[in-house]
Amino acid sequence: MKILGVEFAPLRIPLERRLQTAAVFYYCTNFIFFGFSMLFLWIYLFFTNYYFVSLLYLAWFIYDHKTCCQGGRRLEWLRRWRIWKYFANYFPVKMIKTADFDPNKNYILGYHPHGIMCYGAFSCFATEATNFSEVFPGITPRILTLEGQFWFPFHREHILSTGACAATKESIEWNLTREGKGNALILVVGGASEALDAHPGRASLVLKRRKGFVRLAIKHGASLVPVFGFGENDLFDQLDNPPGSSLRKIQDRLKTYLGFSLPIVHGRGIFQYNFGMLPYRKPINVIIGKPIDVERNPKPTEEEVSKLHQRY
């Protein structure tokens, strides 16, 4: 049904689809607003009769702030929430396995592309929506994200519960040396820079100069696994921002100061299909490649790193 050029959703939509939309709305609002809103709430409570809540949380944070770099604090029951099934089925997200993983080895999975909000990576590795534990028995996935995400009060607890850890050298080395075997660390290699190139029908990757994860794989003998989310870039329309344009220069400058990028995008709304903050319903097929076995070398040379990076 169209009114003034806006295409509205039909009134009669199956409950299943409404629940899928609600699940994605929850994720989007959480991703964009929850961290800052919890920070403001924490500050606000200091000026109320409930100031002790903020003080107690501050004490907890000081005690617990390193957890994001020391294996995290996953909660399997939260990873198995029914809401995540609705979330993944909205697009839908499909995880495709091409090879078995050995539970006696550790792995670094490079996810490409970043897209706008990493919907494919989140569905497959931060939840059990695509049944990761059944498809890869004996493997514990830990998705890596910006360390700054773990500085937001209350919000950090939610992120930690999905099994997420900080995307830092310290965190990666801890997980590869102190958490035993059967660990799969999922790194969105292109990061914030790649989000600015997330345009429908394109797959521009930031990879050529990203060699740190390869170096760590050699240092600790972790197998490298390329992962590609086909359809990840098709979920939003982004304002044209080619490298060198005025908009791109502003976005790059803001990324330098903030640590994250600010792509200008739009998708669909809850009740109409033309504009809004929700992604379009387009399939995401996450292909998990065959592991590249890596021989451990505590002091890898630049030649070794470049050779493995090229192979990857």
Image (cartoon, helix red, strand yellow):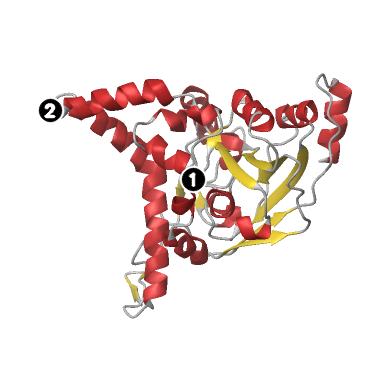
**Horizontal and vertical percent for residue 153?**
34, 31
Whether residue 245 can be seen here: no
From the viewer's perspective, is residue 171 above or below residue 299? Answer: below
Q: Looking at numbered disc 1 in the image, what kind of residue is underneath it?
A: Thr
Front one among 266 and 165: 165
Q: Nearer the viewer, residue 238 or 310?
A: 310
Can residue 139 be seen here? Answer: yes
Q: Which mark is residue 48?
A: 2
The amino acid type found where label 2 is placed reads: Thr
**241, 191: nearer the viewer:** 191
Q: Residues within 10 Å of mark 1 (few under 14, many from 20)?
A: many
Which residue is pictured at 35% across the width and 42% down the height?
A: 33
What kind of element bears circle 2?
A: loop
Horizontal and vertical percent for residue 73?
49, 38
Determine whether, in the image, residue 100 is placed left or right of residue 286.
right
138 and 131: which is toward the camera: 138
Nearer the camera: disc 2 or disc 1? 1
Name the residue furthest bottom.
12
**From the viewer's perspective, is residue 298 above or below residue 164?**
above
**Mark on residue 173?**
none
Q: Looking at the picture, does residue 290 appear above or below residue 271?
A: above
The answer to which of marks 2 and 1 sits earlier in the sequence is 2
Residue 18 lies left or right of residue 206; in this view the side is left
Residue at 47% x, 60% y is 87
**Label 1 near label 2: C-beta < 8 Å?**
no
Secondary element type, mark 1: loop
Q: Quadrant of the C terminus?
A: top right
Q: Going by the image, does 261 lie left or right of 18? A: right
Label for residue 162?
1
C-alpha span from label 2 to label 1: 32 Å
